[in-house]
Each structure stands twice: as C-alpha cells, then as structure tokens.
Image (cartoon, rainbow, N blue to C red):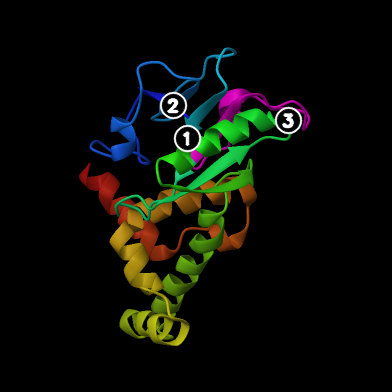
Amino acid sequence: MTYTVEMRGESRSFPPGDPFLAGAADAAEVLVLLGTPALAPQPGLRAVLVELGTECLGVHTGEDSGEEGSNVLGFARYRNGDDPPSNLVELVRQPRTAPAAIAAATAVLEGAGLTVALCSDGAGRIVDRLVRPKYNVALRFLDEGLATAADMDLTCRMGLGYPDGPVERVTRGGLAIHHDVTRALFEVYGTAAYAPARRAVVAAARRDRDA
C-alpha cells in the first residue's frame, strides 16, 4: 500500500530522518497528514491519517451524535516524552469509520514495520491513559517520602521485570511534557489520577519561566 505525506508542522511521530518519511510516494491512495494540521475533505482517497497530540480525532472531523466517521482516522506513534518514537502506533477510529479505510491505514503502517493498536476516539487514547496515573503516583510517593526514586525504580525493574522504573522513565521523557499531557487529560476526564503531580507542575513552571 503506497502513501503520501504532507508535513504541516513538527511531527512527534515521524521526526526528520525517520524511514517512514523516505518511503512516501508523490501520489498515493493514502494521505498521511503530520503536525496536527487543519483537515480538508479528501473523498478520493482510500484513507486519510491525521496525526494527533492528546486531542480527540473529533476535534478535526467534527462529531455527530455517535454517527461520525468517514475515511479519516487519527494516529499517534507512542513516544515517552523526548525519547525516540517507539514502534507502537495507536490508530483511532470513529463509530462509522469505513472498514476499507481502517484496512488501508493498517496496511500502510504495518508495511513500514510498525505495530498497530486500533482504538476508539478518546483524549490520550490507550497508552497515556494507562501510564500517566502510574507516573503521578510514583511522583507523589516521592514527595511523601514513601521511598526514594532509586528504590521505586529498582523495585519495578527487579520485582516486576520492567526495563526501567516509573520515576526514571518519566524524568527521562521530561517532567514538563508529563505535566502537559496529564493536564490535558485532567481537563477532559476530571479524574484525580490525571491531575499533574507537584514535581511536574514545578518543571512546567520552570520551562515556561525560562522560555
């Protein structure tokens, strides 16, 4: 399945030099829009993929009482803050998304060696909604003196077999970025688990002060 890419801003999923960009054709049946662009209808294509941040696909397509859906899908390649992008792509469908569009989008992404997880439309999709509360808990435990960062990370690595611990992972990715993601999720869902932890608030304030 061939695809073409339109770069309309900085892409977190496919930064400069990513092999996916080199594999794009000048014209194809699938259009990939990078940089969270404004969306215009593309009825002649099999699928249109819109890169998402934390927002819902409905921000770009509009919504219609649970009947929304077309050949447009959202996607985001999971990335831990400033770490390099992973091979996991969350592909976002709406209730009436065309099955042929899902198949075409999946073929393009899997053809590029990526792993696709299909999900319904929701802010933060799957991964951020799962992991951000865990990072918040670890940061709050650190504030409360329950354990040191090193001990929490060691426990997760040795006891649970994780490749890294929650504090080292969220710190490596960027506490200010964690703040931005959790704040966006908290505004949508209003759940205390998504409220940015104090250390993330401090990191974001320092970033904004120094900008």
Amino acid type for the residue under numbered disc 2: Thr
Q: Is residue 62 above or below residue 123?
A: above
The alpha-carbon separation of the residues under discs 3 and 2 comes to: 24 Å
The x and y percentages for residue 67 are 77, 28
Looking at the rendered structure, the kind of residue marked 3 is: Arg
Res. 108 mark: 1
The answer to whether the residue labelled 1 contacts the one labelled 3, judged by CB atoms less than 8 Å apart, is: no
Q: Give the range drawn in magenta.
A: 54-75
Q: Mark 3 vs mark 2: which is more N-terminal?
A: 2
**Dot 2 crowding, Cα within 10 Å, few <14, some 14–19, many 20+:** some
Query: Can the viewer see residue 57 in this picture?
Result: no
> Which residue is at 60% across, 35% downward?
103
Q: Quadrant of the C terminus?
A: top left
Kind of residue indicated by mark 1: Val
Task: For label 1, count other residues whose C-alpha is less than 10 Å away and answer few (under 14), some (14-19) or many (20+).
Answer: some
Q: Is residue 131 above or below residue 120?
A: below
Residue 54: give x, y in percent of width and height: 50, 43
In which quadrant of the rendered view does residue 95 lie? Answer: top right
Mark 2 residue element: loop
Name the mark nearer the viewer: 3 or 2.
Answer: 2
Is 173 covered by the magenta stretch? Answer: no
Q: Residue at x 42, y 76 (%)?
A: 162
Pick whichever of labels 2 and 1 is earlier in the sequence. 2
Tag 2 residue: 2
Labelled disc at residue 96: 3
Q: Is 4 placed above or below 174 here? A: above
Q: Which of these two is toward me, 47 or 195?
A: 47
